[in-house]
Image (tube, coloured by chain):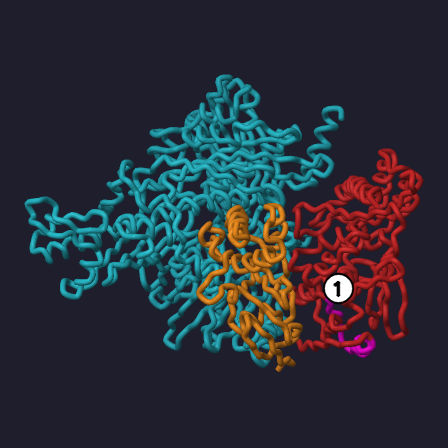
Amino acid sequence: MDVRYEAPQTLEAAVALLAGATAPAKILAGGTDVIVQMETDLIEPSLLVDIKKIPELRQITAENGGFRIGAAVPGMELMAHKALNKAWPGVLDGVKLIGSIQVRGRASIGGNLCNGSPAADSVPPLIAAGAIARIIGLKGTREVPVEQIPTGPGKTSLAKDEIIVSFFLPARPPHSGDAYQRFTPRTEMDIAVVGVGVNLTLDNGGTCTAARVALGAVAPTVLLVKECADALIGTKVDNAALEKLAAAASAACRPIDDKRGTKEYRIKIAGVLAKRTALAALEVARKN
Amino acid sequence: MAQAHPILENSGFNPDKKLKIVGSSPIKHDGLDKVTGRAKFGADMFLPGMLVGKILRSPHAHAIIKSIDISAAEKLPGVKAVICRDDFPEIKAGSADGDMTRNAMAREKALYDGHPVAAVAATSESVAKAALKLIKVEYEVLPHVIDPVEAMQPDAPILHDYLRTKGVKGADKPTNVVERYELGMGDVEAGFKEADVIVEREFDTKPMHQGYIEPQGCVAATTEDGQIELWCSTQAPWVYRDRLSNILKIETAKIRIQQSEMGGGFGGKTGFYPEPIAIQLSRKAKRPVKIALTRNEVFRATGPVSGTKSRIKIGCKKDGTITAAEAELIFQTGPFTGSAFTNAPQAMFTRYALKNVKTVSYEVVSNRPKVNSFRAPCVPQVVFGVEGVIEELARKIGMDPIDFRLKNAATEGYKTIYGDVFGPIGFVETLQAAKKCDHYKSPVPAGQGRGTAAGFWFNRGGETTGTLNIGIDGSVTLILGTTDVAGSRISISMMAAEELGIPVDKVRAVMADTHSLGFNRVTAGSRTTFSTGMVIIDSARKAITELCKRAAGIWGVSPDAVTFEDGFCKPAGANVGSFEPLSIAQIAAKTMATHGAIAGHSEMNVTGAGPGFGLHIVDVAVDKETGRVDIKRYTVVEDAGKAIHRLQVEGQFQGGAVQGIGWALNEEYCYGKDGRMENPSFLDYRMPVASDVPMIDTEIVEVPNPRHPYGLRGVGEVPVVPTMAAIANAIGQCIGVRPQSLPMSPPKILKLIDDHKAKNGG
Amino acid sequence: MAKKYHITTTVNGDEYEYLCEAQQTLLDVLRDELQLAGTKEGCATGDCGACTVTVDGTMVCACLVLAVETDGAKVDTIEGMANGNELHPLQRSFLELNGSQCGICTPGILIAARELLKRNPDPTETEIRYWLAGNLCRCTGYDKIIRSVQAAAKEMRGA
């Protein structure tokens, strides 16, 4: 029942603590999942490594025309960052839906991802955005596309000694837009029954030249669905394209029945929401 | 038969009396503590040497408890007491007390996921939690049953071998059906023959939780000579005391319960949960013990509302006259009886002047937590169906639904199915006010649907006590027994001030402990402002009689020669003599020289509660691709008799309606195949948040109840009675098919839309 | 004995020192160690907002912060909301308009509303509703809470 708390100041120290842990260790970022899991006896870590005092995890910086976001930057700080909001409104749509304002005062996108929930709201738009996670561990640093991190409910591809340091969001070509929408019974304070992230780029004539579509809460992990993207690329995102997108989204679902929604319902809503989210992304793209 | 109390015979209600305080909205005296964080709720008591109590709960829905080994837990450093069934007196199963003690701590069997099986008291929470893990319980898991209809089947797992159905002749086999209850009037068959239109539908509703934000919290302290002090969040201090006395075999004089501020109850704090456990831990540990339930425990093991299945049939003539009504109702009650299901057949049609009614109701046990009261226990669930059939009939004969209700509305003199004859009631006035209100008159916005529904509640009286003390400066303190669930202290203070003719700021009310007053029935059924108000008005009148006596003594005249008016004792006429009127403060200043303190005290079994009626109007929009329902506009019209404190009355209307919105749209218990609750958290239980609802408009109708000195009727129950029905009716208008199952969650609504489309050729 | 940490935290302007276990939350410590029980526990999982406080100016659920994380931090709770005998305008409007019924959610809602008005002195009804979505109330139906916030905002704007 003894729990040890450490708050290292450097990445190296944090990695060393994790690597050296002989009993279950847990990384503490915003704590909005970890503390709940401790409170409800789902996890019983012997070591908590608080990574919020490590500078690299707390900064938002410009990089190669894009952004590098520290993995532990709280949601409210991300929401207050004007340039980031302008470039990646869809990523911010996801952030804004994590818990309440109180929760977002602490919760981070690194934590949202590492918690491993297929319903995590910031993950589909990050995947749609093509975000790359920078991971540090005993063996050094590696750069990994976000979609390769979750491996199942509550599980990630990170090794025991690894920490996500930051996410890189690339520069935006002209006429690009992204959006994230989710479906929940309540307006707020809810877990996505389905979440859809869409990121697309148009040419000067309004034809979609690139797209990425990610679906949340419809499979053990968030899905990056190529068929959805293909439904949009080369079209003007007209009704026919949207119908194809919806069908591809529904076809990609491998959901479960649970307290938050039935299989049948999730499959149907994935299609509805894919269309709506694509239209929202389209509107953004047309303005940029 | 004891003689009825004078105030119950003649309340002194005077419709022409000009009221100075009643009907306004002064700041409640307990409000300041609530906005500053000083108010002390159940978990806010701290005593020196206090231990932390934690409860071990069954992970099984139905299991024989073969053995419990607490020895390892007892040895853990910091653990001061471990208890289980062996620490509670043996009481025969199947009796009221037997059920109560078994619900508090499982005995032979664990009967639901979350049923307490053992508990520890330790010096810290972490030690207590570690100790729980050291308790070894050996279970023999049995098949379980969650759904009440499944529980009624002949091959269903039986919860109690001793149970036989009450109300069925020759019932000799073990069953899960606690009772069959038939209630009716007139000739239903003849009535249906007269009908031009008959609608018959089946409905089901799910258990919902009262959802109070404050989990049960208590601190028990005991002394060497066996006295017990219990601080807890409760709607029923005296009922808790008497039941604790019964199950723990301790005399009532040795149990002193002090009610804390209560952070919401809505019926859910009318029966105890951690309190007997805290007491037994404290007796064993010889130290004070606090138990504050977690939200998970609150959901898994405290009282939800009965889920129901119902079949409802109503017939009417083309002119709208209802000729007959029939219902078959099933109520789920958890593992023990206590749903108060007989309320339902008594109240479900009551508001319409029906002559021919037949109802058959069943109460059924299953492996879920024992149900507890909730606003108008068991009535909203069945009104969900009744008011759906009512609106459907109205539309079938081409009548406005409110006109249809007006056509059938009960009025003074109607003899109800439960035998009472209505005095002056305000159902017609409520319906008329609804027709005239801005919401009903305005057109339904495009794409939306509008529904209405009506509701009724008896309102209650019951055993009540109270004391009014006048201080030497003329200010007044009230000692009240009933719990203040939503501002009754200020409302009752207002009535005392009105009687005494003093400003309400000169009155302060406290909630008594169980040693300070005689028995008070539970604060429930919309009885408190009415009943405790009666008792305090009666106390004030007694104090006034005494004030007049004192004034008479000061003046040297007969007490009959003194009258009391607007806060002053005055000579009753010119022939009495010429005396300057004496204020309460002036008389009180002389109490030392006269006969000591002036007070009034009253206790009575209050009768004369005036029934309450309401009508709700709601506009909804439905997302036809997802089935999500959005409440766009909501109006509550309800008869308060007389609104004592207007803002509080509005608050009751609004709060009830939004609880109903939650029940209507999303709230439900999800059980896995293993019989465990899958959503025991606020996150997954989905009560409405601020952004889910609109402003709730209110219209207070005032048709006085003459049995109360100021005409009031209880207002706490009715606001939730019609809500789900009104919303369902509105959804029906929007999507073309009226939902018959709660909650009306997006998947269910989408399925209705899709099925309806398929049936009507897309 | 469980391992304990020595923590120094400024709460409502006063410095407190205490010992706590690593898994104890700020809520546990405020209530059980410092007996500042105005901060309420409704769920301990961040779903009800009854324990809303600010830590270094950020609004959080005290149940989702470990006490050890607040070493050296400034915590503000409901007990520090009034300025001596002078109530905050929100406290007054909640009294006058009956924004508080049973009162258990009130401390959290007052803190949350104060933080809203600091950032947005003239919020719309919708903005208030979404800002307060993390604060459950079961008594009022939210109507009088929203009106109380609107009234206080108006007063604070001097409108």
Q: Which chain is cyan?
A: B
For this orientation, the residue located farthest to the front is C158
Span highlighted in magenta in the image: A12-29
Chain of the residue displaying label 1: A
Tell me: residue B283, above or below residue B327.
below
Q: What residue is shown at x 30% (from left), y 55% (from top)?
A: B466
On the picture, is A125 further left or further right than B495? right
x and y percentages locating residue B407 in the rendered image: 45, 23
Q: Quadrant of residue B75?
A: bottom right
Tell me: residue B160, above or below residue C84.
above
Kindly state the secondary structure of the residue where label 1 is placed: loop
Kindly identify which residue carries mark 1: A73
Tell me: residue C76, above or below residue A262.
below
On the picture, is B589 further left or further right than C129? left
Q: How busy is the neighbourhood of tag 1: few (under 14 within 10 Å), some, or many (20 plus)?
A: many
Q: Nearer the viewer, residue A9 or B331?
A: A9
Tally of marks: 1
Q: What residue is shown at x 78% (from left), y 66% (from top)?
A: A59
On the picture, is A141 further left or further right than B185? right
Q: Is A113 within the magenta?
A: no
x and y percentages locating residue B414 in the rendered image: 36, 29
x and y percentages locating residue B171 in the rendered image: 50, 43
Q: Which chain is orange?
A: C
